[in-house]
Amino acid sequence: MPPPSFRIDLSPCIPVRCGKHIEYVGLRELLTNAHRIDDLALPLPPARSGLYRVLAAICAAVTELDDPDQPIKEWLDHRAELLRREDGFDTDAVHAYFDADPGAFDLFHPTRPWWQDAALAVQCPKRSGINSLIYGRAAGRNLVWFNPRHTDTDPQPVPTREALWSLLAYHYYGPSGRATTRTVDGVTSGQLKAGPLRSTVSFHPRGRTLYETLLLHQTPYRGDDQAPGSDACPWQEPPADPLRTPHAATWPKRLLTGRSMHAALLVPDTSGEHVTDAYLTWATQHPLLEATDPYLVYDIDPKTPAERRRSPRRADADHALFRALPALALAGDEHRPGCRPEAFTTINSLPTDTRASLRVWVCGFDQEGQVNNRIWYTSLTPPIWPLAQENDPVKASRIVECCAAAETLGAALRRQADQAWKGTGLTPPPAKGGGRRDASPWAGQALASYWPRAEQAFWELVDDTRSAYGVFAATAITALSETTVDALNRLPKAGPALARAVQSLRRAGTSPDDTLRLTKGPHAQP
């Protein structure tokens, strides 16, 4: 019997959306037909975010947009020319990319499995278990109620294509902490460092077709001189020595695909149609490579030392997604807490029709640093070019003003809910050791009600002239009232305490003092 094989360039393993239909394709068909495909349709959003980066690296090679010596103007003109094409990627170039090393795209190649390290079968004394790889299954300290049918005591095989999706998510969003022990040249460790995207939120440009989307994911080279041939994806070269200092995050391939802190090896069944187990461990003990991911918003704190001034914005499932719009609408500067992702800095160079239809797919993965994955969330914005400062500075400023007002009233709601709770005499006991008191239940419940309402109000406010502070004050009052309606009948002191809270929220809605912290700088509102 031949050894198992699963070529991801040929096997139908990637779900894509074509009109109302979902189809499964290999990477070759995905790229050759990208101009006929609407978008990726992976049901695991972190895997989809990772796959965009993988495809962007391949797209750069196929289109020759990966030439670091090409002047930026020529690079922008070349991309614009590609965006005007109606027949998609050059088919010969796509096949040439995969034919250059077809074995590199076999998930179960005996010596060079795709984005895996075959040496783990010897270097790890035991396997990690398939449940540790598949998102949603219980393993170790993960939460069992995500998928109670799968337990450590009865791990079930998973279809190979689904294992591929989790492998993508593992490389980008994998945990820190304990992992399967690995010994390399006498060095033994079972400690992991977090993946490059762990706990972050990504902003992916979305075109009318997958072809447009992948070209919109391209960014020009802006670094110092880069040696020819120094840039490669992990599957284009032998597995890296885990003890050696990793290669620099060269553009664009290592930047997009070469910063994983994790090593993996899938164990297939005899047919190759299912994965039954996996080795999951560390790929390097060195720190994460310094790089600016082109799809992340970086928050800037001018008060901190330069080496720690920029940090990726963390994903927060409780954080309404419209609050990130100022980073997309305005060009970044050092005075604001967020700057536009690099993938959106060349928006003016796009053809007019492409620019007018550009949307943003947002993918956040709210995770703890180590094992637990809280929740992932996604959103698709309307076309953002009409909202951008370059096209409509008045509307861009209105977006910033509305976000600032929403933030201000959200903070006021938290304070007033806490104060009202204390006013009822139900103040929680101090934390042990004299620490701060826990937040009141009313605050969390009121904010959970406030932010979805605030998002709806935001989109209405963008196109009208009502006072943003007044609208969000009313939204906050509604959220607080709904949260505390039962308490009014049970707690004698609740009525006066809540009345004071409502009055304070009304004042916050008419006085914007100290509320423009998101708009400091040249775009500040008076």
Image (cartoon, helix red, strand yellow):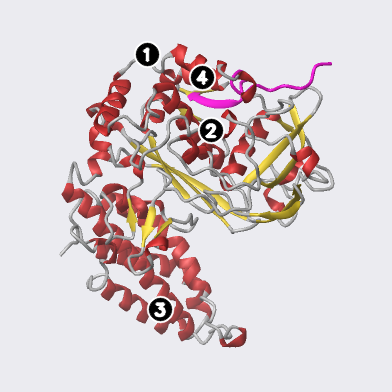
N-terminal of the pair, mark 2 or mark 1, is 1
Is 303 rendered above or below residue 203?
below
N-terminal of the pair, mark 3 or mark 2, is 2
Label ID, residue 244:
none
Q: Amino acid at mark 1?
A: Asp
Label ID, residue 87:
1
Separation of disc 3 and disc 2 at Cα? 59 Å
Q: Is residue 17 visible?
A: yes
Separation of disc 1 and disc 3 at Cα? 63 Å
Separation of disc 4 and disc 1 at Cα? 18 Å
Say which of 312 and 423 sits in front.
312
Q: Secondary structure at mark 4?
A: helix
Residue positioned 34% across, 64% down in the render:
407
Q: Quadrant of the N terminus?
A: top right
Main SS class of the magenta portion in the image: loop
Query: Do the residues bearing badges 3 and 4 touch, measured as CB atoms within 8 Å?
Result: no
N-terminal of the pair, mark 2 or mark 4, is 4
Is 294 rendered above or below residue 352?
below
Residues packed near mark 3 inside 10 Å, few (<14), some (14 to 19) or many (20 plus) = many
N-terminal of the pair, mark 1 or mark 3, is 1
Question: Quick check: 214 left or right of 328?
Answer: right
N-terminal of the pair, mark 4 or mark 1, is 1
Q: Amino acid at mark 2?
A: Cys
N-terminal of the pair, mark 3 or mark 4, is 4
Q: Amino acid at mark 4?
A: Tyr
Q: Nearer the viewer, mark 1 or mark 3?
A: 1
For label 3, the residue is: 498
Label ID, residue 97:
4
Label ID, residue 233:
2
Question: Quick check: 429 left or right of 457?
Answer: right
Residue positioned 35% across, 42% down in the render:
224
